[in-house]
Every structure is written in structure tokens, then in C-alpha cells.
Image (tube, rainbow, N blue to C red):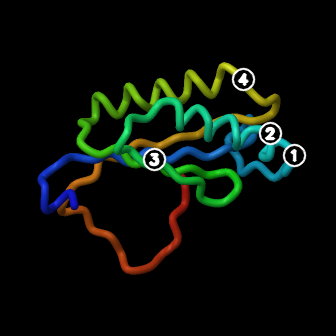
Amino acid sequence: MIERTGQSACLLLYWLVDPKGHALTDTDKIAQAAPLLSGAIHDSLRRGDAFTQHGRDRFLVLLIGTDRENCEIVDQRIQARYKQQPVRGVALRHSLQTVETDMPFPNSGIWQPQ
């Protein structure tokens, strides 16, 4: 769609981690924190944006028709809303990528957070 319409897009990735930035293994903490992050994301998006939960502890957000600056504003808004109700022992990692029409997408592979 981006290629056809010429619109810009931004992909935000969020995952719940322990305070040292490692994968969170405590399922109780994930169960407490994931709905809070989901709510923070939901409350921060416009109509036409989309998000989904990928697994127990990861979220993908797609912002259509926005530039990097506005994407950073949405990212900051999501983080601020999530931090209003923090879960002890849970941190939030995030990544922001602008989507280009000529981005190479491999046919297969495993995505790892950086």
C-alpha cells in the first residue's frame, strides 16, 4: 500500500524486559504489564494506525502517513502513558523504524531485538 500511495509509514516495536534489558521470564509480571502496555498503545494512536501483540511480551505498532518526527512523538506518548502505572521489575525496550518502499524484506529469518 505504501508503494502504491506514496504514503510514509513508521514501525514501532515494544517488548517487555527485566531491568537489565534481558528477556522477561516471569509470567506473572508479563501478565500484569502486557495489558498496561496494550492500553498505553491503544490510547496513543489515531484512527487508521494499527497495533498487535506478538507473543506474550511484544507489540508491533504501524503508523501510516506519518514522518519520523511525529512517529517519535507517538513513541514518547506511549512510553509516558505506560510509565504512569509501572510494574515493579519490568522495563520497556523499544525500536523505531521508518518504512521505505525499497526496504529489503527477506523471505525468511528470525527477528531478534537489538
Earlier residue among tags 4 and 2 = 2
Return the residue at label 2.
Answer: 32
Q: Position of residue 32 (x, y in %)?
A: 80, 39
Asked whether the beta carbons under mark 1 and mark 2 sit within 8 Å of each other, the answer is: yes
Residue type indicated by callout 2: Gln
Q: Report, in whole angstroms, how far the alpha carbon at label 4 lies from the one at label 2.
A: 10 Å
Q: Eyeballing the image, is 55 above or below 37?
A: below
Q: Which mark is residue 85?
A: 4
Residue type indicated by callout 1: Asp
Mark 1 neighbour class, 10 Å CA radius: few under 14, some 14 to 19, many 20 or more: few
- The structure residue drawn at horizontal position 52% and vertical position 40%, both measured from the top left corner, is 94
Residue type indicated by callout 3: Val
| Closer to us: 44 or 79 | 44
In the image, taking residue 35 as reference, residue 61 lies left or right, namely left
Q: Report, in whole angstroms, how far the alpha carbon at label 2 lies from the one at label 3.
A: 20 Å
- The structure residue drawn at horizontal position 28% and vertical position 35%, both measured from the top left corner, is 68
Q: Report, in whole angstroms, how far the alpha carbon at label 4 lies from the one at label 3.
A: 20 Å
- The structure residue drawn at horizontal position 82% and vertical position 29%, both measured from the top left corner, is 88
Q: Report, in whole angstroms, how far the alpha carbon at label 3 lies from the one at label 1.
A: 24 Å
Asked whether the beta carbons under mark 4 and mark 2 sit within 8 Å of each other, the answer is: no
Return the residue at label 3.
Answer: 61
Residue type indicated by callout 4: Gln
- The structure residue drawn at horizontal position 65% and vertical position 23%, both measured from the top left corner, is 83
